[in-house]
Amino acid sequence: MEEFGKMNCSTNVGNKITILTFYQLMKNTIIIILFLAVLSFMQTSCNKNNQTVPYVPLDSYLNLNLPAYINLNGIGGWAYVSGGNEGLIIYRQTQDNFMVYDRYCTYNVEGSCGAVMVDSSNISISCECDGSKYQLFDGAVIQGPATTNLHQYRFEYNSNSNQLHIYN
Ligand code: FES
């Protein structure tokens, strides 16, 4: 009788240990799954919403008398120019004021499809990746998912020589 009682007791303890081990295993699995979910969310949000355009040094002098820049000689004209992350769009806002945009879409700055292009209307700039739109006039967002305006570079214009200096 005493023997039976001992056996019963050790079986209960064994069952408890098995149940505890099972719960421990479940807990660890849930923790690992949660950790992986958080990690994948961070990865996605980083790729999809990073608003910081990577820094690329820029320091170029453009002679606007050259045929490549002929469109920049009239107010409202624009041209694609190399430089920046994905190239630049330069827009002549007034006689003396230019806008120098990085073509990098500000919605997905780490993606490969985020180079913006001037629309045929000559009024807006679009990213074909997810449909973000910006004003050509000042680079402001006019349609999401982007929420940050196009990145701009500085400029100095010498009207005597018709030279445009673009830089960070
Ligand atoms: S990268 Fe998606 S809208 Fe531009």
Image: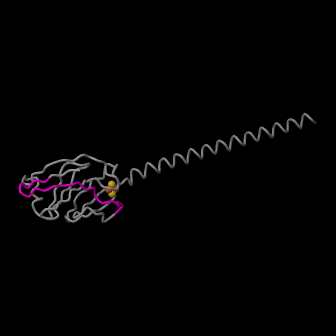
Left or right placement of residue 152 versus residue 42 in this view: left
Residue at 15% x, 65% y: name it: 94
Q: Quadrant of the N terminus?
A: top right
**Residue 72 in picture, x, y percent from top left:** 12, 59
Q: In the displayed image of the protein, which residue is found farthest to the right?
A: 1
Name the image colouring: one colour
Q: Is residue 129 visible?
A: no
Kindly tell me whether residue 44 is visible in this rendering: yes
* Figure quadrant, ligand 1: bottom left
State the image quarter where residue 95 is shown: bottom left
Query: Residue 16, relative to residue 91: is it above or below?
Result: above
Residue 5, image x and y in percent? Answer: 89, 38
* Residue 58 as seen in the image, left or right of residue 64: right
- Residue at (29%, 62%) from the top-left corner? 133
Which residues make up the magenta segment? Answer: 144-164
The location of residue 43, given as percent across then percent down, is 43, 48
- Decide whether residue 157 is among the magenta residues: yes
Picture quarter containing residue 21? Answer: top right
In the rendered view, does 29 fall on the left or right side of 100?
right
* Image quadrant where residue 8 sits: top right
Q: Say whether residue 132 is magenta.
A: no
Q: What is the tally of numbered marks visible in this picture?
A: 0
Q: Where's residue 100, x and y in %?
A: 21, 56
